[in-house]
Amino acid sequence: MVKETEPSNNEKAFVLEALREGLRVDGRGPHDMRTVAITLGPQYGHAEVRLGKTRATANISAEIVRPRANAPNEGHLIFQTDFSPMASPAFDDTRITDEEVHISRLLERALRMSHAVDTEGLCIMAGEKVWQLRVDLRILDHEGNIADCACMAAIAGLLHYKRPDVTLSGEDVIVHTSEERNPIPLGIHHIPVCVTFGFFEDGERQVVDPTLLEEHVQSGDLTFVVNKHREVCTLTKAGGVAITVDQVLSCANIAAAKAAEITELIKDAITKSQKDQPTLLVETPNVVPPPPMA
């Protein structure tokens, strides 16, 4: 595997000196995020998010499966991440990297365990047939802060997705095309948003949405998952420099404000998509009936 080129000592010193003066290499303030661009379509559930030069896509698909024994009336939500080697020389398509595992687990906690999606609304026949939603995430360009970009792509894709309508005929499930019946949007209880902080100089300085260069220089990070109601869905801090309770509370307030801004951006993108593309494709081939019981 090709390793990423580490920044030189001069580059590291320049980043730290700029932070001491309240500046960042790309011209942002310490608590400013990069520009967010969200593109939806051409089919339901496809979202592409650009966070500065970091780019990720999400594609939502569905199939009919048997429910879990301990949750007979709830559907499933699963995540699959793919870090393209074209995005960074550090990514290797022959094995799963630690960062890929970290992103998958973060999304599990952010979207599934926070009950952002109404899984009971995915039930077709209790104990027999439910919808399983699969979120395929692909990182196309890596210029820092993959977590926030991937989370935005996933929730935008879920908000944009519409599953085929179904009817029951005895124990048989009839899946209708979009020509026969209008597809049905998912039930989304709230919109969780990831906001990542980078810490420098033993935690004395912090920034929002670190770039790749800043990630190489930082001494630790902290990711909040918050919704616009200021509810903390989860937070993660995998090692790094120790920070105080006051710093955590300060970051939580900043994250809540950023989450409200990003939520409005996502909603605006959904509204614009509905106006520009009132009728999109529904990928019915992704809906596969479960195998018969032995």
Image (tube, helix red, strand yellow):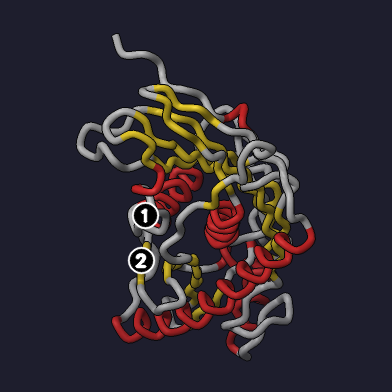
Residue under the image location 29 percent in, 81 percent down: 245
Are the residues flagged by discs 1 and 2 in contact, CB closer than 8 Å? yes
- Is 52 on the left-hand or right-hand side of 132? right
> Which residue matches tag 1?
109
Which of 239 and 248 lies nearest the eye of the viewer? 248
Name the kind of residue labelled 1 in the image.
Arg
Residue 45 location in percent, x, y?
A: 62, 47
Question: Of 31 and 202, which appears nearest the observer?
Answer: 31
Disc number placed over residue 233 in the picture, else none = 2
Sequence-wise, the earlier of marks 1 and 2 is 1
Residue type, mark 2 in image: Cys
Look at 32% across and 86% down and name the residue there: 246
x, y percent for residue 129:
36, 30
Q: Nearer the viewer, residue 94 or 3?
A: 94
In x, y percent, where is residue 146? 58, 56
Q: Quadrant of the C terminus?
A: top left
For the N terminus, which image quadrant?
top right
| Cα separation between marks 1 and 2 | 8 Å
Regarding mark 1 in the picture, which secondary structure is present there? helix
Residue pictured at 60% horizontal, 35% vertical:
92
Quadrant position of residue 35: bottom right
